[in-house]
Amino acid sequence: IADNLLFAQKTSVLGSDNTHTHTFVGNITASGNVKITSADPNLRIEDTNGRSVEIDVTDDIFRIDDVGNNAAIFTTDLSTNPTQTTFQTKPTFLRDAEFEGSISASGNITASGNIRAGGEIIGTINGGTF
């Protein structure tokens, strides 16, 4: 396709106007970076069964959306340092998970196995302290 474009248009720019749309059948391979430059960049990844996710950046928010359910999977606030990520769904860890820093919860914490601590566990149960 590049040879045809170079010959016909005398340019190596594909889609030199933002009204141009190009459809490819088959694979697109890049040996370097692929970059989307836009005030509101968006990338949709869709499989042949119609399941898809969108990756976009709007203002200072990076998000990945489940298109079929019209819902965010997670969002990251890029204006904070360190960045703050909010999971919109309940994450499931299939392996061990390690966290640095504090973990806080506004609801119940449950476990189907043991809970281990390298230090003291401090809290209250039914008004009593342990």
Image (tube, helix red, strand yellow):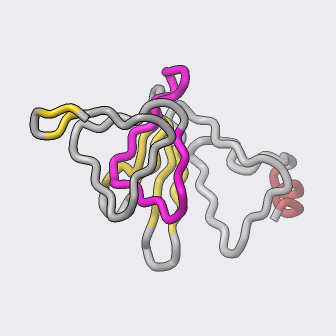
**Camera-side residue: 1 or 130?**
130
Height in image: 113 above or below 54? below
Dominant SS type (magenta): loop
Residue depicted at 50% across the width and 30% down the height:
101
Residue depicted at 52% across the width and 41% down the height:
99
Residue depicted at 21% across the width and 42% down the height:
107
| Quadrant in which the N terminus is drawn | bottom right
**Camera-side residue: 25 or 127?**
127
Residue 58, image x and y in percent? 45, 33
Residue 119, image x and y in percent? 47, 36
Residue 17, image x and y in percent? 64, 41
Height in image: 108 above or below 78? below
Residue 78 part of the magenta-drawn span: yes
| Quadrant in which the C terminus is drawn | top left
Numbered marks: total: 0
**Camera-side residue: 96 or 68?**
96
**Camera-side residue: 85 or 8?**
85
Residue 13 part of the magenta-drawn span: no
Q: Is residue 91 left or right of residue 44?
A: left
Q: Is residue 29 left or right of residue 77?
A: right
Residue depicted at 52% across the width and 28% down the height:
83
| Bounds of the magenta segment | 76-99
Height in image: 106 above or below 78? below
Q: Residue furthest bottom?
A: 49
Q: Is residue 33 left or right of residue 69?
A: right
Residue 82, image x and y in percent? 54, 24
Q: Is residue 49 left or right of residue 45?
A: left
